[in-house]
Amino acid sequence: MMMSIDATIVATALHALEQDLGASINWTSWVITAYWFGYVVMLPVSGRLSERYGHRRVFLLSTLAFAAASLACGLADSIYALVLFRALQSAGGAGLTPAATGIIVTWFGPSRDRALGLFGAVFPVGAMIGPLFGGLFVTYASWRDVFFVNVPLGALAALLGLWLIPRDRAVNRLRGRTDVPGMCWLGLAVIGGMLAASTLGDADARLASWRFLLPAATSLLCGRQFFRHIRQTAAPFLEPRLIYGPGFGATNVLNAAYAGATAGAITLVPLYATSRYGLSALDSGTLLIAEAIAAITLSTLAAYLLRLSGYRLPFYVGGTLTALGLLLLVPGPPGGIPAYAWLATAAALIGAGAGIMSPASRNACLQLVPRQASTMAALRATAQELGVIVALAAATATMARTSEPTAALAHIYLVLALVCLVVLPLVRRVPEHRGAW
């Protein structure tokens, strides 16, 4: 919940902190960018560290690091310090989900599949209330409070963790040398790719410019070296089969595609509603509530039905509903249907699709490698974040290069819907499982 709130609450404070710190727009945007850079880079690393040093230990240290960095963000007296502390904050936050997943898999026994499914229902709640609390803090207090709120939450989570989470089982810890070169190659590849993608959002960006080519080439070369390294190393921090092996590769691609389509679409829905239909900022913002409610409700129901449905059926149903919701956004509403009701229905369908898929995507492949649950959780989150980054970068670049961004956005929704349908055949390669594991 703390991580989910932080992912959306900071965006509401950007204008206020820009004025208070006297920052430029470019540096202000790095308050968001630096966080996601650090988060995506550290996710696979934190998953491996959790298995090596213990899920409970990494969870507690990550919680305290996140809270301490949040305090530093709130006390920052310059935009440069704030960007630095946001990167440190992301390093702490990246350890929470993999470690928590490892804790659930280790201690929940036959109930772990449902616990993991319900665990995912927390994220839409935080994403929904984050902007609300952010608006209240900025309006009636200070932008610094969007960071300070994490300090008591983090301290409370750490105290509860010390009390409630059992100590790590020593037999589950992985031994051996840490694969530092592999971590570095992967980190450089991800950073280069994200930098290349972020440049596409500039209106004057060109594919032939060094601003794009240099980080893109760096990403490709380092990525090639990373895959070469993990194939030749006896104990890589990420085993090749977990990335592209039978079953694992298909699941990773599906997670990236559906996360990119869902998050990319929902992030741009308020802009679409305002620019195309003239809805107010309040009305366009409440469309996200329809998406969140559908996601929370359906993910909870899907978690309890997972043992009957297996993993493939939720992907088929959820992917189809997501595509249908995206397709509804392309044309205008039929005669007599208010634009708000039409858009809310589309947003709800997208949220329902994401909610139905969430428990299956969290559990898929885990029953094959339960001792590497943290690594699999980190890979899932990494695939999803990379999908979101690519989808938003492509959408932003497309809108920046046209005189009619609203029409371009409608075409983007059409492309995202087609992506959801095109990847559906991959579902048959997802490892099927019914019942507890």
Image (tube, rainbow, N blue to C red):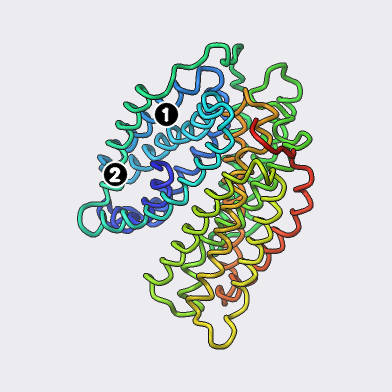
Q: Position of residue 82 (x, y in %)?
A: 34, 42
| Residue under the point 62% across and 22% down | 371
Dot 1: within a 10 Å radius of its alpha carbon, few (fewer than 14), some, or many (20 or more) residues?
many
Q: Is residue 271 left or right of residue 383?
A: left
Q: Position of residue 138 (x, y in %)?
A: 26, 56
| Residue under the point 38% across and 34% down | 66
Quarter of the image where one finds residue 282: bottom left
- The answer to whether mark 1 and mark 2 are in CB contact below 8 A is no
Q: Is residue 108 left or right of residue 279?
A: right
Secondary structure beneath label 2: loop
- Label 2 belongs to which residue? 78
Query: Relative to residue 364, is residue 132 depicted above or below?
Result: below
Q: Is residue 113 left or right of residue 292?
A: right
Three-letter code for the amino acid on which mark 1 is drawn: Ser
Total residue callouts: 2
Q: Position of residue 235 (x, y in %)?
A: 68, 17
Q: Position of residue 358 (x, y in %)?
A: 58, 47
Query: Relative to residue 215, is residue 349 depicted above or below?
Result: below
Query: Of residues 289 and 3, which is closer to you in this image?
Result: 289
- Label 1 belongs to which residue? 62
Three-letter code for the amino acid on which mark 2 is drawn: Ser
Query: Of residues 46 and 205, which is closer to you in this image?
Result: 46
Secondary structure beneath label 1: helix
Dot 2: within a 10 Å radius of its alpha carbon, few (fewer than 14), some, or many (20 or more) residues?
some
Q: Quadrant of the C terminus?
A: top right
